[in-house]
Amino acid sequence: VMNKDGNAVVAGGEAPQQLVDDLDTTTSKLRRFAAKQPCFGDYAFAKIWLGQKGIVMPMHYDATDNMYIMAWGRKRAIIGEPGQLDQLYRYPNGHPLVGSTQVNL
């Protein structure tokens, strides 16, 4: 939704003005929040995830920071402690699913 320069894009092209306005409003509020979090790294590389009812994401790890905001409904999330990556039975390096666990929780 945003390119590396922080401009709103849709499939590589220009985004509709309403989306641009919504992203500007949202990111200005999120930047203030993120700046107060001592553990939150560079906001520019954070990901925001959107989904719909019934979407299941397999257990995985991310190499960059994420900000998960639940707009409505509920979501079950299992979060491992730092240093527990090897205990998650991840796929080996070079495997297409290297960032995911082999365990189905």
Image (cartoon, grey):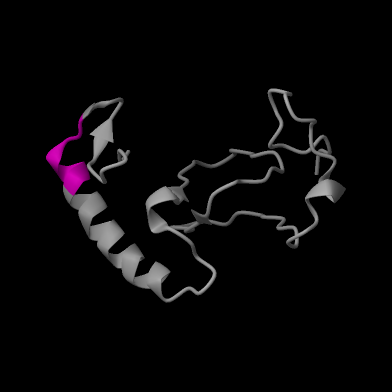
For the point 70% across and 28% down, which residue is it?
Answer: 97
The x and y percentages for residue 20 are: 19, 45
Quadrant including the N terminus: top left
Residue 9 occupies quadrant: top left
For the point 26% across and 63% down, which residue is it?
Answer: 28
Specify whether 15 is left or right of 59: left
Residue 105 occupies quadrant: top right
68 to 100, vertically: above or below: below
Task: Please provide the residue range marked out in magenta.
Answer: 14-20
Q: Is residue 15 magenta?
A: yes
17 to 77, vertically: above or below: above
Residue 18 occupies quadrant: top left
Q: Is residue 51 magenta?
A: no
Residue farthest to the left? 17
Specify whether 12 is left or right of 46: left
The x and y percentages for residue 23 are: 25, 50
